[in-house]
Amino acid sequence: MAYWIIKTEPGTYSFNDLERDKKTSWDGVRNYQARNNLKLMRVGDLALVYHSVGPKELVGIAEVTKTAYPDPTADDDAWVAVDVKFDRWLKHPVKLSRIKEERELFDLALVKQGRLSVCPVSVKEWRILLKMSE
């Protein structure tokens, strides 16, 4: 199993929307590195969902239910989407400002490559982030 952070703008599609819909296609990614990360996702992988506008915080967990396929919102077959389903809310959101203060997360892609919309997370980083949410 691998771990990820997937970003969304809550005004466009929030974690509340995913909870309501139960599952969705994670599409619209138009960055090559983020696209390559989508291609690496496997069924059962978990992703922390990050609201990139407003308080800028991790809010919940989604599970990958379908691996990469052509993004139906793109005119070019180079772009892909994956399907995810709602898993659970974090007990407490984890703000980006707190993440940046944690020495062991200095290399987290969310910190080092702030504009990347799909980021890998190591097992150690995942555990730290979950602990921060308790």
Image (cartoon, rainbow, N blue to C red):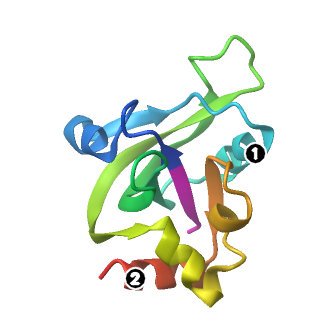
Q: Quadrant of the N terminus?
A: bottom right
Task: Give the residue at x 30% y 57%.
Answer: 87
Residue 36, label in figure = 1
Instruction: Determine which residue is flagged by label 2.
Output: 132
Q: Does the magenta portion include 4?
A: yes
> Given the image, on which type of amino acid does mark 2 rest?
Met
Q: Nearer the viewer, residue 6 or 68?
A: 6
Which residue sits furthest left?
A: 20
> Considering the numbered disc 2 on the image, is that residue within a helix, a strand or a loop?
helix
| Rendering coords of residue 110 (x, y %) | 63, 62
- Residue farthest to the top? 75
Q: Which residues are magenta?
A: 1-6
Residue shown at 62%/50% (left/top)? 118
Q: Residue at x 57, y 17 (%)?
A: 73
> Could you say which quadrant of the image residue 130 lies in?
bottom left
**Residue 19 at x, y percent in the picture:** 24, 45
In front of the other: 81 or 126: 126
